[in-house]
Image (cartoon, rainbow, N blue to C red):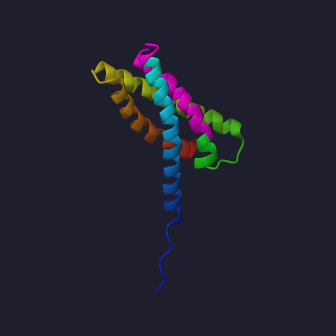
Amino acid sequence: MAASPRPVVAVVSLRRVGRYALVGSVATAAHYALLACLVERARWPAWAAAGAGAALGAQLAFVGNRVFTFAHRGPAGPAWRRFQATAFLGLLLTMALVALGTFAGWHYMVGQAVATVMVWLLTFLINRHWTF
């Protein structure tokens, strides 16, 4: 009896999720580094520093996701605009969650960690189905 073929769609999707996570890890490291620097050194409010970090991370993520995760070959302009709209939504959600977390008495990095998970899930779905 011949082995049944592997579901190609599931393999491709898992590969994309892994690549998205890798690109996101690099972007998130830059985000967290800027966040910590702005809060600890420049004394920015955590929610504002989280927004600045998210903006930096988004730019790194666009390039990585366009080239590495989704291997997008179309014109960069339309994808860049859609990605920026998605990133802006993520930025606003990040800022709100960090603000809520610090208001609740959490350390700003705990709020950022919660925001990271929630925004990662949301933006993966949007980027997969709309951006690229």
Q: Position of residue 20 (x, y in %)?
A: 52, 46
Residue 48 relative to residue 113: left or right? right
Residue shown at 53%/32% (left/top)?
A: 57
Across and down, in percent, residue 78 comes to 67, 37
Q: Nearer the viewer, residue 91 or 49?
A: 49
- Residue 132 in view (yes/no): no
Q: Position of residue 79 (x, y in %)?
A: 65, 39
Q: To which quarter of the image does residue 55 belong?
A: top right
Identify the residue shown where x is 52% and y is 39%. Answer: 26
Furthest-top residue in this view: 43
Q: Residue furthest bottom?
A: 1
| Most foreground residue, 21 or 80 | 21
Q: Is residue 2 visible?
A: yes
Magenta region's main secondary structure?
A: helix
Q: Which quadrant of the figure contains the C terminus?
A: top right
**Residue 123 picture location, percent across and down:** 49, 39
Q: Nearer the viewer, residue 131 or 12?
A: 12
Q: Magenta residues?
A: 40-63
Residue pictured at 47% horizontal, 13% vertical: 42
Q: Is residue 57 magenta?
A: yes
**Vertical relation: 12 (above or below) 123:** below
Q: Residue furthest right?
A: 75
